[in-house]
Image (spheres, helix red, strand yellow):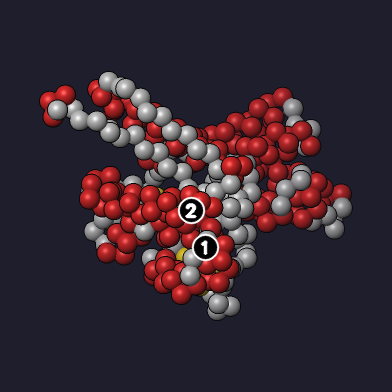
């Protein structure tokens, strides 16, 4: 998420912080975050425009700050508008921090196919912006071998998606990683999903009932409805992604949705 024109909710928060600091010069951003019951690093990122204010916290903030009338309405609306923009990745303008991968680059193709790249990138998103992480920690948390993890990290650094600083720790570059063009190459599309299914098979026995959601249906359908089905699934995926970005991330999950034929067409029988 790039820094730019301040959102209305940022202006309200800045004005309130300035008012409190005028009354008490020792009042800090950390104190403000503690009062609003949010992590100080997240609060800092919200105030600087590096992160959206979680919708789940907007009403809490409004209540604690005693917002009312037009101020309350505009405060909540500015949060809702921002999340509506984040949830519609296909309408991102050039220059926004969506890291779109292309199909005409060997490194991009590797990142698109292997689930480990997206998983590591997502894991770094669970870490505070100012806190780096070691390859060993990533490997341990992601059930991967450390040597292999380093190879994936090297590629992500080469692509500019991750930074390795002099302290030897890895940091995520702000933004979302998006494989916008993969559906245009069906063989690459198949290979990427084979990788995802292999991940599912590998982790299936380690799932706990209260840590995952399983749902499947076998249905007789009118195949002409497939375009509408595709649209509904993609819309749901966008809404789910926007919802899951709210709040503090602390774990990496994989969402998969497959709708495919298991019978022959009438003219093939």
The residue that mark 2 highlights is 203
Give yes or no for contact between labels 1 and 2 (Cβ–Cβ under 8 Å): yes
* Picture layout, residue 244 above or below residue 236: below
**Residue 56, which numbered label?**
none
Q: Position of residue 209 (x, y in %)?
A: 59, 42
- Is residue 95 or residue 5 the one in the foreground? 95
Q: Residues within 10 Å of mark 1 (few under 14, many from 20)?
A: few
The residue that mark 1 highlights is 143
Pick the quarter of the image with the C terminus: top left
Q: Position of residue 15 (x, y in %)?
A: 73, 44
Q: Position of residue 205 (x, y in %)?
A: 51, 51
- Is residue 127 or residue 49 the one in the foreground? 127
- Secondary structure of the residue carrying tag 2 is helix
Residue drawn where x is 43% and y is 50% of the image: 200
**In the image: residue 29, left or right of residue 124:** right
Q: Nearer the viewer, mark 1 or mark 2?
A: 2
């Amino acid at each position: 998420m790039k820094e730019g024109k301040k959102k209305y909710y940022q202006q309200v928060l800045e004005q309130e912080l300035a008012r409190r600091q005028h009354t008490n010069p020792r009042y800090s951003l950390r104190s403000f975050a503690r009062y609003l019951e949010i992590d100080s690093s997240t609060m800092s990122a919200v105030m600087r425009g590096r992160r959206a204010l979680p919708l789940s916290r907007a009403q809490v903030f409004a209540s604690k700050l005693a917002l009312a009338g037009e101020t309350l309405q505009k405060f909540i609306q500015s949060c809702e508008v921002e999340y509506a923009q984040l949830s519609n990745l296909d309408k991102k303008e050039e220059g926004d921090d969506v890291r779109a991968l292309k199909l005409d680059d060997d490194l991009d193709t590797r990142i698109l196919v292997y689930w480990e790249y997206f998983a590591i990138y997502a894991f770094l998103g669970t870490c505070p912006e100012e806190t780096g992480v070691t390859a060993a920690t990533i490997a341990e948390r992601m059930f991967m071998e450390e040597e292999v993890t380093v190879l994936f990290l090297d590629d992500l650094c080469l692509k500019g998606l991750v930074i390795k600083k002099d302290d030897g720790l890895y940091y995520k570059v702000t933004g979302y990683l998006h494989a916008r063009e993969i559906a245009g190459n069906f063989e690459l599309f198949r290979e990427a999903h084979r990788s995802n299914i292999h991940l599912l098979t590998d982790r299936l026995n380690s799932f706990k009932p209260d840590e995952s959601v399983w749902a499947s249906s076998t249905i007789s359908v009118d195949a002409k409805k497939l375009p509408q089905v595709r649209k509904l699934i993609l819309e749901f995926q966008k809404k789910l992604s926007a919802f899951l970005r709210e709040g503090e991330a602390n774990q990496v999950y994989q969402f998969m949705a497959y709708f495919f034929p298991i019978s022959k067409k009438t003219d093939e029988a």
